[in-house]
Amino acid sequence: MKPITLDLFTQYSFLSNLQYSSVDHKIIFTETRSDMEKNDYTQRLHCIDMDTNTVTPFTDWKKRTPSYMMKDGTVLVVEHDEDDKTVHTYFKVCKVSDGSEVASFTLPCSVGSIQDFNEDYYLASITINRSYPSYHHLSLEERESIEKEKKENEDYVIFDEYPFFFNGAGIINGDRNTLVLVHKKSYEIIDLVAPTVDVESFDVDGEDIVYSGVDFIDVKGKWSWVWKVNTKSLETTVLYDEVMQINRVFVLDHKVIVNGTFAKDYGAMEAGKFYELRDKQMYLVCDNEYSLYNSVGSDCRYGRNKYFYKKENKAYFITADHSRSVILEFDGVSLIKRVEFEGTCDDMVITDQGIYSIVMKGQALQEVAIVEGASVEVFTSFNTAILEDKYVAVPQKVTVPKETPIDGWVLLPKDYDPSKKYAAILDIHGGPKTAYGEIFYHEMQHWASLGYVVMFCNPRGSDGKGNEFADLRHNFGKIDYEDIMDFVDEVLKQYPCIDAERLGVTGGSYGGYMTNWIIGQTQRFKAAATQRSISNWITEVCASDYGIDFPIEQEFDDLYNCQEELWDMSPLKYANNATTPTLFIHSIEDYRCPIPEAIQLFTVLKCRGIETKLVAFKGENHELSRSGKPLHRIRRLREITQWMDKHLN
């Protein structure tokens, strides 16, 4: 069998954005591939004939192909008009039946999503800015004048609210997600929401639109309100204005349903319960401990996927359940599992012929399948050939037998011989409220192909096991560190082939935080590679897009005088204990864990004479390992691998 090479991911197909046309009984979805010549990605749409499950390309390869299915069997495909220098979104209107273009139009705004509202109007989610809230109503000449003014002032950035930037989006000072109606013939735009409201979720109920979000000018809080706007009168009504963290608002049978939490039992990271909202009061209709998003990680995804879908007065959610993702059905009263198999559902559409999903099952890469219960009928083969002659390690489950059992896995190296001794790499996931599962992870498979034992686990704080398991309030670096070390001990006990003197550790985001924490607590690891990490919670809280959410989630007694609590759980406090050779991988435009988080700890280690190196990537953000430019992803993985090779072999 051939090894999984470092750059093999550049040959994978990443699938996303399933959309269903009931008119034509067809489904479209996006395929993304690496474009090595341009050091970028390229996309095209495919169409599934649901009668035969045959798949055919729907568009040519392009840099990006955002698309939106309409009820009449057309799809709006977003392209860029190079001649238009103003903010705009250019749509081609294509028939799903044959892919032919039937119309095109441009909207003078940045469109995040667009859907049918009725025969006359689209409903669109767009981005506006408080500096120019009426930009999309201005003439072309006026918009060009604004762009000229922006160009003249491009060397200056003004921050006058918080958050002022966001990972992957850049500077967002003054930006608001808002809702508008767009006339299908005249393309007249009708505003539906006050310009200071940042809309977070919305749903349609006849002529009304119900939405949740935060109304702010200076600081965006963590707690949301709910409004209703009538599209005929444009009258807005406040439906809820108390303290609640709202994950999603939607409508079933004209009842407003809210998934959210009052954060009373497990803090702001508590999973949202289902409430019916009426008369400005929340009435519990269904308890819930699922996070309602797919948190089972992999570095083999790219593109827009949805975790929520509505059909015939039922709502569907993708969520993490232990080490897998499942599809839940909510009928307004109770939740049931519609799909549950060992693997992940990365996207879904609910059709009259069943549930279609993009799945990862076993150690296979993404494919489209029909799913129900534990049944998975895969009918595409985008990625089959790429792995069929490769060594793909099968995860061996390891459970730590303690009061709160901890599940993890081991990947055995290529050409494994139990009589030999092997170096091992511990990989720690981000989050912390995410999870590892028994699905394909490129970087881990590459290390297994190189001859490493790879181990990974879901310590307390991880997703998929309910609120109590995920609760890390006041316990960062304590119970999670204990679980990870207990897991390493159990792996060493069960796999005597591992050389305990040749252990490496790596992880990203929260996994980077834990890597930083570990090197200040123990010398058992001979090499560490910390990625997009946190070293100082004080600076992280004050300078990241996540920022003030953290002390709120930790429920410190005094949010504005919690420096002692933050410092106690900061790896930087224990940096003088560290002796482990440590590699730092960070992105310069990472606003989730800004680069000073790496620089602070790197500086301490370097000045103390500990072998260390910082590799900082220009033009990349927190998503480097998953959606960074292909050549940057290769360089990142090569740096980590060479660091481990140097210190463990």
Image (cartoon, helix red, strand yellow):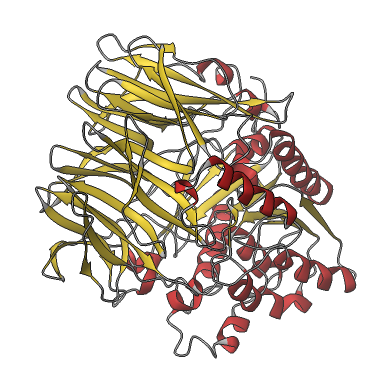
Question: Is residue 240 visible from the viewing direction of this image?
Answer: yes
Expressed as whole percent of the image width and height from the top left, the position of residue 590 reads 66, 56
Above or below, 336 against 187 in this view is below
Expressed as whole percent of the image width and height from the top left, the position of residue 632 reads 73, 40
Expressed as whole percent of the image width and height from the top left, the position of residue 315 reads 20, 44
Expressed as whole percent of the image width and height from the top left, the position of residue 445 reads 61, 35
The residue lying at 16 percent from left, 42 percent from top is 314
Above or below, 26 against 254 in this view is above
The residue lying at 53 percent from left, 63 percent from top is 174
Q: Nearer the viewer, residue 424 or 14?
A: 14
The quadrant in which residue 537 appears is: bottom right
The quadrant in which residue 517 appears is: bottom right
Question: Is residue 342 visible from the viewing direction of this image?
Answer: no
The residue lying at 75 percent from left, 75 percent from top is 575
Q: Nearer the viewer, residue 560 or 95?
A: 95
Q: Is residue 463 left or right of residue 158?
A: left
Q: Nearer the viewer, residue 328 or 188?
A: 188
Q: Is residue 527 left or right of residue 543?
A: right
Q: Quadrant of the C terminus?
A: top right
